Structures are given as structure tokens and as C-alpha cells.
Image (cartoon, grey):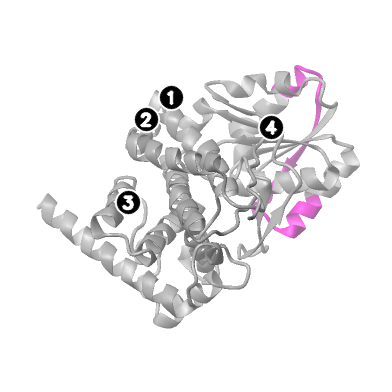
């Protein structure tokens, strides 16, 4: 029998004004930190992080992230960290910034601190980065010997972010149990390098349960930029539960199809990670022969959060069969996560994508009839 493997960050902290205590959490860890954030996030949270670190006499080297989690960007910032002799690497912002920070920390063997400013992906807790080309095309996963040392989320900052980011995180997290279940059923391997533990299965299931109970309430709280128990629950589901679930539970077709979409040119690249995963999740449910009412349960929640459910929604209204097959071929490439959950061909995946689009069009038509 294969080994069961479960991994996780050393410490997870979430709450209103949590960022104010970042210096306390890092006191005694090191004297110099590299802080990485993009231009926008520096104004939102980066400057505050530096201020709270300085209160505890932790010096910083501040770096502006260029926007793509590419090998070139990872190497550029790693060189800066080495020159500064930094023992702490802090990523502040969204998924690509955080993935880059993890790569830099791995290069300098530093203490890894992840400070998400949105709850838009489950990347923060994991011991891996998704690596893209400088043009934004998916290239590979990069794995590390340990998870982040500290993941810190300030709920007040997340409440102030655009609701689209929270919805994107909900979509990403809704894939967790769907994919974990398929990996378990197929005896596949997880991102942690073994079979799924009972703990990871339970966490993934709790993640989905939490989102169906609180996602819309959290989204509405985010629309008014207020911190509520529902928002706190969804921040945890999007970040911690989904992060632990996907990494120690496994990825299946939904994320492979997301990766497949990066093979196409056009407006689809303006969509968030979670928005593309939402459609991938529906395709996976289609491939698994779930009944109509179950698939529509996901469609209904996605629609209430303004998430995409049709090819038109993901800017592929005029995609040809050839385009869809290109996505399917990339999704079924050697080493893709779809193989941990399915034994399928590119043609079968292409058929499922087209069928999902038709199911969603029909669902939207029924919604319009109900409203009229």
C-alpha cells in the first residue's frame, strides 16, 4: 500500500487587524526581511507591513513584484534577497506574488511568510508554486521541502478588496472536494507525494460544506466591505481548508482544464485563476456522470456570485472544436493532474467541455424563464 502523506504550514493566523502583529510573530526570527508586493499592494498593505516590522527592529529590503510568477522574476528577486542577506522572505498580495515569494525563500533558505491581501486562491498555505512563462502561459509546478512558516491574513484588508477576488477564491475552493473525491476514487497521488489521508478528505468536505452555507453571505459582506462571521468562515475555507485539502487531498480535472485554457490566446487571460477553475469544475462533474440537479447546484452558486459557467462567460464564445481540443490536449498532457483522477483522452475531455457549455446555456435559459 502507498504511504499516506499530510503536510501543512507551521502557523496560520487570521483575523481583523492581524497584520498589526506581524512583527510580534517574527520577533527573534531574523534581522532582515525581503518584502515583495506589486505596486498596488504596496499602498494597500506593503507599507504597513514594513512599518510593523520596523517597530520590532526588523530591517527590510522592499521589492516591487513585476506581475508574473515566472522563473526570470523568481531569479531576479532571489538575487536581491541574497545581496541583502535576508533570512526572512515576506510575500504580500495575490497568488502569483505569494508563489514567487515561496520560490525566493526556497532559493535563500529563508523563513517564509505569506500575507494574502485577498482570499482569491488556495495558494498561500502550500509547499508549491505554479510557474508561468513571462507571457502568462502555465509551465509547471515547483515543489519545496517545506510549507510556509507563517500564513497571516488580515480580514479587514480582505473585506476591503473587490468582491470579484473573494468569488474567485470561492470557485477555486469549490473544486477542492470535487477533485479530492475523484483522486481518492482513483487511488491517485496527492501534491504532497502520497495517498490522501482521512484528515485531508474531511477538511475538503468541510470546505465545500462551508462554502455552500456561507459563500453568498460572505460575498454580500464583502460588497459592503465589512467583516462578518460568514466572511471569516469563507476566508478560512478559501485559504486554509482549500489549501490543506488540495495539497494533501489531490488535484484532478478541474485544475488541469484551467491549465489547458492557458494554451489559448485572447481575452480568457483576463479572467482570474478561480474563474477558469469554476468552469473546469463543471467539466469534471460532467465527466463524472453526476445527475443534473447536482451539477445545477454548483451552477446556481456560481451564478449568484457572478462567476462564469459557459464558454461565452470565459471569453470563448466563438471557440472552434479545434480550439477546445487544444485546451483538452494541454489538460491531458503527461504529468497533468487529470491523470490522478481519470483515464481519459483529449477527445473525451473536449466533448465534456462542449457538453458543459450546453448544460450551462440550458440552465441560464431556465433561470431567465423563472425571472420572467
First in residue order: circle 4 vs circle 2: 4
In what element is the residue under mark 1? loop
* x 76%, y 59%: residue: 72
Residue that badge 1 annotates: 227
Compute the Cα span from label 3 to label 4: 33 Å
Q: Are marks 1 and 4 in contact (CB under 8 Å)?
A: no
Say which mark, if any, is on residue 221: 2
Nearest to the observer: residue 81 or residue 65: 81
Residue at the outermost bottom position: 322
Q: Is residue 308 left or right of residue 60?
A: left
Residues drawn in magenta:
52-76
Compute the Cα span from label 2 to label 3: 21 Å
Nearest to the observer: residue 268 or residue 276: 276
Expressed as whole percent of the image width and height from the top left, the position of residue 258 reads 50, 62
Compute the Cα span from label 4 to label 2: 30 Å
Compute the Cα span from label 1 to label 4: 26 Å
Q: Is residue 119 visible?
A: no
Residue that badge 4 annotates: 10
* x 66%, y 50%: residue: 3
Which mark is in front, 1 or 4? 4
First in residue order: circle 2 vs circle 3: 2
Compute the Cα span from label 3 to label 1: 25 Å
Nearest to the observer: residue 129 or residue 323: 129
Counting other residues with Cα less than 10 Å from the Cα at mark 1, is it few (<14), some (14-19), or many (20 or more)?
A: some
Expressed as whole percent of the image width and height from the top left, the position of residue 168 reads 45, 47
In what element is the residue under mark 2? helix
Expressed as whole percent of the image width and height from the top left, the position of residue 354 reads 35, 73
In what element is the residue under mark 3? helix
Say which mark, if any, is on residue 298: 3
Amino acid at each position: 500500500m502507498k504511504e499516506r502523506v499530510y503536510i501543512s504550514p507551521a502557523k496560520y493566523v487570521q483575523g481583523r487587524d492581524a497584520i498589526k502583529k506581524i512583527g510580534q510573530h517574527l520577533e527573534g526570527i531574523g534581522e532582515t526581511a525581503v518584502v515583495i508586493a506589486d505596486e498596488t499592494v504596496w499602498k494597500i498593505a506593503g507599507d504597513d507591513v514594513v512599518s510593523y516590522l520596523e517597530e520590532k527592529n526588523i530591517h527590510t529590503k522592499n521589492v516591487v513584484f513585476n506581475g508574473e510568477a515566472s522563473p526570470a522574476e523568481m531569479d531576479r528577486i532571489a538575487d536581491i534577497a541574497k545581496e541583502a542577506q535576508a533570512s526572512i522572505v515576506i510575500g504580500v498580495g495575490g497568488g502569483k506574488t505569494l508563489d514567487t515569494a515561496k520560490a525566493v525563500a526556497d532559493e535563500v533558505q529563508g523563513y517564509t511568510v505569506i500575507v494574502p491581501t485577498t482570499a482569491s486562491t488556495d495558494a498561500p498555505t502550500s509547499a508549491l508554486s505554479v510557474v508561468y512563462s513571462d507571457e502568462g502561459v502555465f509551465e509547471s509546478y515547483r515543489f519545496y521541502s517545506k510549507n510556509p512558516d507563517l500564513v497571516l491574513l488580515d480580514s479587514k484588508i480582505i473585506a476591503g478588496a473587490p468582491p470579484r477576488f473573494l468569488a474567485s477564491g470561492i470557485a477555486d475552493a469549490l473544486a477542492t472536494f470535487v477533485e479530492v473525491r475523484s483522486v481518492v476514487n482513483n487511488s491517485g497521488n496527492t501534491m504532497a507525494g502520497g495517498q490522501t489521508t482521512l484528515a485531508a478528505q474531511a477538511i475538503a468536505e468541510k470546505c465545500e460544506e462551508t462554502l455552500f452555507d456561507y459563500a453568498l453571505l460572505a460575498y454580500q459582506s464583502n460588497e459592503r466591505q465589512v467583516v462578518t462571521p460568514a466572511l471569516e468562515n469563507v476566508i478560512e475555507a478559501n485559504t486554509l481548508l482549500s489549501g490543506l485539502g488540495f495539497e494533501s487531498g489531490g488535484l484532478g480535472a478541474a485544475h488541469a482544464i484551467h491549465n489547458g485554457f492557458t494554451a489559448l490566446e485572447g481575452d480568457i487571460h483576463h479572467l482570474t485563476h478561480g474563474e477558469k477553475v469554476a468552469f473546469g469544475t463543471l467539466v469534471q462533474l460532467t465527466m463524472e456522470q453526476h445527475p443534473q440537479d447536482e451539477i445545477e447546484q454548483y451552477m446556481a452558486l456560481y451564478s449568484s456570485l457572478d462567476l462564469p459557467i459557459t464558454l461565452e462567460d470565459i471569453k470563448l464564445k466563438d471557440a472552434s472544436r479545434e480550439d477546445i481540443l487544444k485546451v483538452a490536449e494541454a489538460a491531458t498532457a503527461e504529468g497533468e493532474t487529470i491523470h490522478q483522477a481519470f483515464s481519459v483522452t483529449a477527445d473525451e475531455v473536449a466533448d465534456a467541455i462542449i457538453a458543459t457549455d450546453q448544460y450551462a446555456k440550458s440552465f441560464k435559459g431556465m433561470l431567465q424563464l423563472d425571472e420572467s
